[in-house]
Image (tube, rainbow, N blue to C red):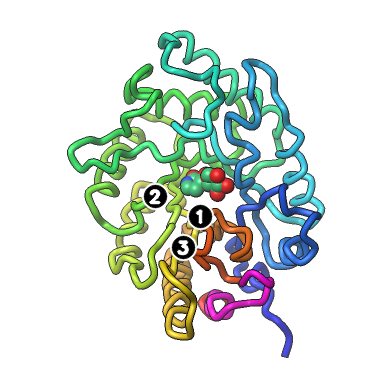
Amino acid sequence: STTPVLRDLAEPRFFGAALNTTFLFADKKYTQLARTQFSIFTPEDEMKWGEIEPVQNVFDFTRADEIVNFAESVGAKIRGHNFLWETHLPPWVNESLSATEIDRPLKHHITTIMQHYKGRVYAWDVVNEPISDDPNATFRDDIWTHKLGQESVAKALTYAREADPVPKLYINDYNIEGINAKSNSLYEVVKSLKQDGIPLDAIGFQSHITLGQVPSSMQENLQRFVDLDLDVAITELDINLLGPANETALAQQAEDYHSVVSTCMEIERCVSVTVWGISDDHSWIPNGEVLPWDGNKNPKPAFFAIGDAF
Ligand code: XIL
């Protein structure tokens, strides 16, 4: 029997991975999987602010371009990642700037990058991780809310739409997969953004999930966002074993992957499932064995479970 090709099985949805230029081409097996199994890629770090505009108004698209060129060469799309986030900022974006001093560079950052990639990016994570983990707060207490208040989210989305009307504009966050205090906060934020006519097309559910803990309310939760006239996507899926792999853990991991992908399949406007990496040796979680391929690039039970669910 032949190995399943997940990008074919996923159609009309996209199956994606976070792709990293450290391993692309240098690791042949990794690159071969990237070439054959995926229909959409997210640059793992290459489009983050500190990478792409390390010095004010000095843009370095080299590594991000490598990924976009690779994606095009294999007929895959790109999810751009990301613009407004508290992490991976260059030193020049810091708390000493005034509101005006940070607002203009924000607009310039978004506009320059979106124009550079015009026509080549399917979706942008315009806003990453805006919601606080503190159930008593709504927005994250970060440089953006300090300087621009909660308007920062609306500003970023508005600048993005002005720069290029075509790509899907996302808010992307973690621990919002089930119905909980954080996803309730996001839901209220999104509802009011929509009421105010702020451009927003979709919500990304990162889905960094711990073994055995796929929320039972995930489908209901995604559906309530769809009911606000939005697309939804699983954007950074991985399932952390929190310990060494054994047959039981790998079987549970497969079940968890199956359950997340099936949830997406149940929702007509769930457009993609992206895993955060390809193989366990190159995951952002060292020793987490979180991905569908192991460190030797062999398919794990999770890989076959994803194929079954699509
Ligand atoms: C992670 C990358 O995987 C790492 O390589 C990097 O060192 C830190 O960032 N949420 C996100 C991603 O939105 O951008 C993060 O990626 C993982 C958590």
Which is nearer the eye, 156 or 207? Answer: 207
Residue depicted at 24% across the width and 54% down the height: 180
Q: Gap between marks 3 and 1, in whole Å?
A: 19 Å
Residue depicted at 44% across the width and 41% down the height: 171
Which is nearer the eye, 21 or 236? Answer: 21
Q: Secondary structure at mark 3?
A: loop
Q: Amino acid at mark 3?
A: Glu
- Give the mark, 2 or 3, whose residue is nearer the N terminus: 2
Residue 174: numbered disc: 2
Residue depicted at 43% across the width and 53% down the height: 205
Residue 254 location, x and y as percent? 48, 77
**Mark 1: is the Cβ under 8 angstroms from ligand 1?**
yes
Q: Quadrant of residue 8?
A: bottom right
**Label 3 belongs to which residue?**
268
Q: Gap between marks 2 and 3, in whole Å?
A: 22 Å
Seen in the image, is 28 located left or right of residue 185? right
**Label 1 belongs to which residue?**
236
Label 2: how many residues lie within 10 Å, few (<14), some (14-19) or many (20+)?
A: many
| Image quarter in which the N terminus is found | bottom right
Label 3: how many residues lie within 10 Å, few (<14), some (14-19) or many (20+)?
A: few
Q: Amino acid at mark 1?
A: Glu
Q: Gap between marks 2 and 1, in whole Å?
A: 9 Å
Residue 186 location, x and y as percent? 31, 43
Q: Secondary structure at mark 1?
A: strand
Label 1: how many residues lie within 10 Å, few (<14), some (14-19) or many (20+)?
A: many
